[in-house]
Image: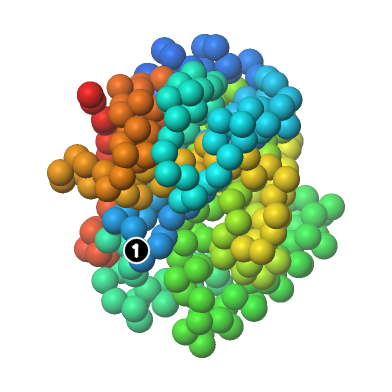
Amino acid sequence: MRVKEEDSPIIKAVNQVYHGTTIADLEADYFHQYGHIDRWTLFSDYSFASGKLNDVVTFSFLPFIQNPFELGSMINLLAPGEIKQTRSVSPAFASFLRHLPFLSFSFVISNHKYGFYNNYQNYKASLLLSLDNLYNSIPGWNEQDPFQKETNIAIGRKIKKIRNYIEQDKKHRVLRNLILITTIGGFLATLVANRTQCTKMGWFSDRDEINDMEKNFSLDLFNITFIQYLYDKYLCKFLAAPADSKSDEFYADLIKIPDYLTGALADYNQTSQTASHSKFSTLIDDVIANNRRNIFIYNMDFHNGQYFPTCSRLMFNR
């Protein structure tokens, strides 16, 4: 996909690694089989916990080829709990994940404390500028689609409130994570939608504090990125389910797909190529390793603000 010079450095990095290291495998082993599917769901999970070795975001796409509630019941039978609640990953569940027709992208993110910058003041100024640019885009959106004017006005109110938080040095870490997740996820959703016959793309996020910010502002940002890069924004409709840190998702079992992958990668030591627990080793060895078909892992390094982020594919060979 062609991206412009003024586009987000995050999108540039993802676009480059996707077309440079990933698309050939997808065309050979995945899209030829599922590219005709017109409905897709995206489940996402994240780990930004201080007690973990790595910060990780995972986006798992499922083509709508079977009843999601039946699939959720199968997952619950094989893996009743989230990865943090389980002592082991059964061979049956590892095999199930290995053969499930989902498409997953995980990003191990490093040196991103202040985003594109190496100090808080520049980082804060960049957040405020990004919010201002977004707010100033609203009149143009209203001209393009007058029927969305009320929605855009509501987005404008949210932007003003979030700007006040940042000016008061509040919630900047949450906003940083929110921008990372919605930018990467929204762009990946566009890549999948543009390559398939997608007419409906649904995003279902894990419970997370990013969704607490101003009435699911994350959904607005995700949709803005998604629409921006669609070949035909009128062909594909974006759907989403609000999920804040206190909600009880009806799709909780399906979230276990990215949850288990995120948990394993958040724990994995790339230097020693080891995990701290056998349950994580099982996922690395039996689900992720030697998989060029549908699970793609990347390192995204922000270099502590010294350079634009770089993104490289991470291979697990056993």
Q: Who's the residue at 62% across and 35% down the image?
A: 76
| Residue 300 can be seen in this image | no
Q: Who's the residue at 70% across and 66% down the image?
A: 215
Name the residue at the left extreme: 272
Colour scheme in use: rainbow
**As drawn, 118 above or below 41:** below
Question: Which residue is tagged 1?
Answer: 51
Q: Is residue 258 left or right of residue 230?
A: left
Q: Who's the residue at 31% across and 45% down the image?
A: 277
Q: Is residue 167 left or right of residue 207?
A: left
For the residue pair 132 and 42, the one nearer the viewer reads as 42
Percent x, y of residue 132: 56, 72
For the residue pair 45 and 137, the one nearer the viewer reads as 45
For the residue pair 177 and 69, the one nearer the viewer reads as 69
Q: Residues within 10 Å of mark 1 (few under 14, many from 20)?
A: few
| Residue 90 can be seen in this image | yes
Q: Is residue 57 left or right of residue 310?
A: right
**As drawn, 48 above or below 36:** below
Q: Determine the image quadrant of residue 163.
A: bottom right
Percent x, y of residue 7: 44, 51
Percent x, y of residue 80: 58, 40
Q: Quadrant of the C terminus?
A: top left
Total marks in image: 1
Q: Determine the image quadrant of residue 88.
A: top left
**Quick one: SS at disc 1?**
loop
For the residue pair 8 and 93, the one nearer the viewer reads as 93
Q: Who's the residue at 51% across and 76% down the image?
A: 171
Name the residue at the front extreme: 87
- Amino acid type for the residue under numbered disc 1: Gly
Percent x, y of residue 68: 70, 30
Q: Determine the image quadrant of residue 95.
A: top left
